[in-house]
Amino acid sequence: MITFLSVIATISVITNLGIAAFLLFRGKRHSYNLLFGFVALSLAIWSFALKIFSSLGVADRASALLWWQIGYIGVIFAPMFFAQFVFKYVAIRNKILSIAIYLLGVSFVLLNFYDHSRLFLCDVRFLTGQYYWHDWTANKNIVWLSAY
Protein backbone atom coordinates (compact mmCIF):
# COMPACT_ATOMS: atom_id res chain seq x y z
CA MET A 1 0.00 0.00 0.00
CA ILE A 2 1.44 3.35 -1.04
CA THR A 3 0.72 6.17 1.37
CA PHE A 4 1.88 9.75 1.51
CA LEU A 5 4.05 8.80 4.47
CA SER A 6 5.80 6.05 2.51
CA VAL A 7 6.47 8.41 -0.42
CA ILE A 8 8.02 11.02 1.88
CA ALA A 9 10.04 8.31 3.64
CA THR A 10 11.35 7.03 0.28
CA ILE A 11 12.51 10.52 -0.68
CA SER A 12 14.18 10.85 2.72
CA VAL A 13 15.97 7.49 2.37
CA ILE A 14 17.33 8.38 -1.07
CA THR A 15 18.44 11.84 0.04
CA ASN A 16 20.07 10.74 3.30
CA LEU A 17 21.81 7.75 1.72
CA GLY A 18 23.21 10.05 -0.96
CA ILE A 19 24.51 12.48 1.63
CA ALA A 20 25.91 9.66 3.77
CA ALA A 21 27.63 7.99 0.82
CA PHE A 22 29.18 11.26 -0.30
CA LEU A 23 30.43 12.18 3.18
CA LEU A 24 31.59 8.70 4.20
CA PHE A 25 33.39 7.78 0.97
CA ARG A 26 34.60 11.12 -0.37
CA GLY A 27 35.43 12.87 2.90
CA LYS A 28 37.19 10.14 4.86
CA ARG A 29 40.08 12.40 5.81
CA HIS A 30 38.05 14.70 8.05
CA SER A 31 36.22 13.52 11.15
CA TYR A 32 33.58 16.22 10.59
CA ASN A 33 32.54 14.50 7.38
CA LEU A 34 32.48 11.08 9.00
CA LEU A 35 30.38 12.22 11.95
CA PHE A 36 27.85 14.06 9.81
CA GLY A 37 27.80 11.09 7.42
CA PHE A 38 26.82 8.90 10.36
CA VAL A 39 24.03 11.38 11.20
CA ALA A 40 22.72 11.06 7.63
CA LEU A 41 23.06 7.27 7.76
CA SER A 42 21.09 7.16 11.03
CA LEU A 43 18.36 9.26 9.45
CA ALA A 44 18.33 6.93 6.43
CA ILE A 45 17.84 3.93 8.73
CA TRP A 46 14.94 5.66 10.45
CA SER A 47 13.40 6.70 7.13
CA PHE A 48 13.76 3.20 5.66
CA ALA A 49 11.99 1.67 8.66
CA LEU A 50 9.32 4.38 8.37
CA LYS A 51 8.78 3.44 4.74
CA ILE A 52 8.49 -0.26 5.56
CA PHE A 53 6.09 -0.01 8.49
CA SER A 54 3.92 2.55 6.72
CA SER A 55 3.49 0.04 3.89
CA LEU A 56 2.42 -2.88 6.09
CA GLY A 57 -1.20 -3.95 6.27
CA VAL A 58 -3.44 -4.31 9.29
CA ALA A 59 -2.50 -7.99 9.83
CA ASP A 60 1.24 -7.28 10.34
CA ARG A 61 1.27 -5.93 13.89
CA ALA A 62 4.40 -7.88 14.96
CA SER A 63 6.27 -6.78 11.82
CA ALA A 64 5.26 -3.19 12.43
CA LEU A 65 6.66 -3.31 15.97
CA LEU A 66 9.90 -4.86 14.68
CA TRP A 67 10.29 -2.11 12.06
CA TRP A 68 9.56 0.55 14.70
CA GLN A 69 12.35 -0.96 16.79
CA ILE A 70 14.74 -0.96 13.82
CA GLY A 71 13.77 2.62 13.02
CA TYR A 72 14.46 3.71 16.56
CA ILE A 73 18.08 2.64 16.12
CA GLY A 74 18.40 5.61 13.77
CA VAL A 75 16.31 7.85 16.02
CA ILE A 76 18.60 7.11 18.96
CA PHE A 77 21.93 7.29 17.11
CA ALA A 78 21.26 10.46 15.08
CA PRO A 79 21.40 12.86 18.07
CA MET A 80 24.43 11.00 19.45
CA PHE A 81 26.42 11.48 16.26
CA PHE A 82 25.14 15.05 15.86
CA ALA A 83 26.24 15.91 19.41
CA GLN A 84 29.67 14.44 18.67
CA PHE A 85 29.80 16.47 15.44
CA VAL A 86 28.98 19.67 17.34
CA PHE A 87 31.55 18.88 20.05
CA LYS A 88 34.19 18.38 17.37
CA TYR A 89 33.14 21.52 15.47
CA VAL A 90 33.26 23.84 18.48
CA ALA A 91 36.34 22.07 19.90
CA ILE A 92 34.79 20.71 23.09
CA ARG A 93 37.09 17.95 24.27
CA ASN A 94 35.12 16.35 27.08
CA LYS A 95 35.72 12.60 26.78
CA ILE A 96 33.57 11.79 29.80
CA LEU A 97 30.55 13.52 28.28
CA SER A 98 31.13 11.82 24.92
CA ILE A 99 31.42 8.39 26.51
CA ALA A 100 28.31 9.04 28.61
CA ILE A 101 26.32 10.00 25.50
CA TYR A 102 27.38 6.85 23.67
CA LEU A 103 26.68 4.61 26.68
CA LEU A 104 23.26 6.16 27.11
CA GLY A 105 22.47 5.66 23.43
CA VAL A 106 23.57 2.03 23.42
CA SER A 107 21.54 1.36 26.57
CA PHE A 108 18.44 2.86 24.89
CA VAL A 109 18.99 0.63 21.85
CA LEU A 110 19.26 -2.43 24.10
CA LEU A 111 16.10 -1.45 25.98
CA ASN A 112 14.40 -0.93 22.64
CA PHE A 113 14.86 -4.61 21.74
CA TYR A 114 14.49 -6.09 25.22
CA ASP A 115 11.25 -8.00 25.93
CA HIS A 116 9.55 -7.02 22.65
CA SER A 117 10.12 -3.35 23.46
CA ARG A 118 7.81 -3.28 26.50
CA LEU A 119 10.41 -1.15 28.28
CA PHE A 120 10.75 1.37 25.48
CA LEU A 121 8.16 1.69 22.71
CA CYS A 122 5.46 -0.35 24.47
CA ASP A 123 2.99 -1.28 21.75
CA VAL A 124 1.72 -0.27 18.32
CA ARG A 125 -1.80 0.42 17.12
CA PHE A 126 -3.28 0.79 13.68
CA LEU A 127 -4.15 4.42 12.91
CA THR A 128 -6.22 6.05 10.19
CA GLY A 129 -6.50 2.77 8.31
CA GLN A 130 -2.99 3.28 6.93
CA TYR A 131 -0.13 2.39 9.30
CA TYR A 132 0.86 1.32 12.80
CA TRP A 133 1.97 3.95 15.26
CA HIS A 134 3.70 3.30 18.57
CA ASP A 135 1.30 3.84 21.44
CA TRP A 136 3.26 5.55 24.18
CA THR A 137 0.09 6.65 25.96
CA ALA A 138 -0.90 3.07 26.83
CA ASN A 139 1.85 2.63 29.44
CA LYS A 140 3.29 6.17 29.69
CA ASN A 141 6.79 4.72 29.67
CA ILE A 142 9.33 6.96 31.40
CA VAL A 143 12.30 5.26 29.67
CA TRP A 144 10.98 6.21 26.22
CA LEU A 145 10.23 9.73 27.41
CA SER A 146 13.72 10.14 28.88
CA ALA A 147 15.24 9.21 25.50
CA TYR A 148 13.86 12.48 24.22
Image (tube, helix red, strand yellow):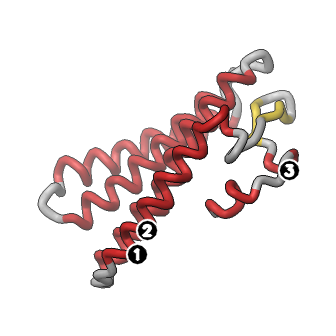
Mark 3 is on which residue type? Thr
Tell me where residue 101 sits by quadrant. Answer: bottom left
Q: Is residue 3 left or right of residue 99?
A: right
Q: Nearer the viewer, mark 3 or mark 1?
A: 1
The residue labelled by disc 1 is 97
| Res 100 label | 2
Outermost left residue? 29
Residue 144 lies, in percent from the top left, at 69, 54
Residue 97 lies, in percent from the top left, at 40, 75
Q: Earlier in the sequence, mark 2 or mark 3?
A: 2
Residue 22 lies, in percent from the top left, at 25, 49
How far apart are the two marked residues, 2 and 3, measured between alpha carbons? Answer: 28 Å
Mark 1 nearby-residue class (10 Å; few <14, some 14–19, many ≥20)? few
Q: Secondary structure at mark 2?
A: helix
Q: Is residue 101 left or right of residue 75?
A: left
**Badges 1 and 2: C-beta atoms under 8 Å apart?**
yes
Mark 3 nearby-residue class (10 Å; few <14, some 14–19, many ≥20)? few
Report whether residue 7 is seen.
no
Residue placed at 34% from the left, 44% from the top?
18
Q: Is residue 60 above or below residue 68?
A: above
Q: Is residue 105 left or right of residue 96?
A: right
Q: Secondary structure at mark 3?
A: helix
The residue labelled by disc 3 is 137
Q: Is residue 87 above or below residue 108?
A: below
Tell me where residue 126 sits by quadrant. Answer: top right
Residue nearest the viewer, comparing 31 with 123: 123
